[in-house]
Image (tube, rainbow, N blue to C red):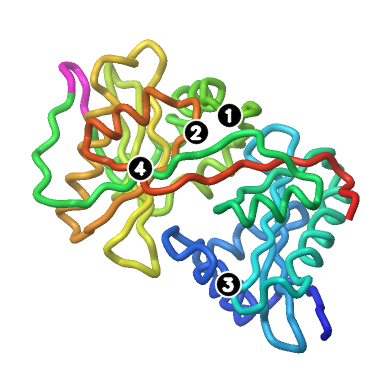
Amino acid sequence: MEISIRPVRSNADYAAWREVRLAVLPDERAPTIEELQIQAGPHHQYVLAELNGAVAGSGFVGKSNLTGQAAVAPRVLPACRRQGVGSEILRVLAQDATAMGFLIAGANAVDAGSARFAERHGFREVDREVEQVRAIGDEPEPQAPPGVTILPVSARPELWLAAYGVVGAQAFQDMATVAVLDVTADEWQRDWITDPNAMFVAVADGEVIGCAGLMPDPDEPRRAEHALTAVRRDWRRRGVAAALKRTSLAWAAANGFSEVYTWTQRGNDDMRALNTHLGFRTRSESIRMQATLPLAT
């Protein structure tokens, strides 16, 4: 039995990487080949694992959105598990993360088996994220609070960067994560929006005070992930977040979507309560695991 790990280089490699991602996480949106190629670089690397010459798994290592951490994501096709493939992928990813200068690696375990695998390699649970899902039906026309206008980013593209400067920065500081989020302006414009028609900003007195929207799934045209919902601190608890979410749901209905899903941190009770109020139901949990580098593998 021969296990080999190699970097992703060609379009065919990226397609194979996506196939593994889709097989392991079928209910989640996978980045497109173009998105993967744009993100790839010295601090954002993708690998493929082969077992006896056939693709058996994939991996990702790079800068996490959590300050000071690397993100690692070893994935193995179900038919190829328990043969050492996952351990070999993780070993390579951890070495690369250490070479990048990181002292901490974080990963998400989608089930108890994945968590046990991570624990065997020195990871421990530090947080959980809750997935909530909403079926799309005949959605009512959303009503914005007095003095607030909600419009798609496509109508005024410059407002997305403006949202990063105030709304995004405050949201990243306030989110119930194990470390403060570290998202650059370039990452905000590259990774946090995919369709300007499906992303919305709330504007009051000429300034952006909130944002929310959807990231349509290229592999499941009737499904979309609900992106970050954030509101400027002085406008919170005034109905802006609910109006933005209702606008997103109405857009989904108008554009033929049947399902929207979203993830929130375990400590973000307010957002989960709002989602529940809007008809979302809990579907699953993801376990956030963390380890000190270098790993003892």
Of the numbered discs 3 and 1, the one sitting upstream in the chain is: 3
User: Tag on residue 293?
Assistant: none
Mark number, residue 177: 1
Residue 25, percent from left and from top = 50, 62
Q: In terms of depth relative to the viewer, which is nearer, 118 or 185?
A: 118
Amino acid type, callout 4: Thr
- Neighbour class for label 2 at 10 Å: few (<14), some, many (≥20)? many
On the image, the x and y values in percent for residue 60 come to 69, 59
| Residue hosting label 4 | 282
Of badges 2 and 4, the one in the foreground is: 4
The residue to which callout 2 is attached is 265
Which residues fall within the magenta stretch?
A: 145-149
Tag 3 residue: 20
Residue found farthest to the bottom? 53
Q: Residues within 10 Å of mark 1 (few under 14, many from 20)?
A: some
SS for callout 2: strand
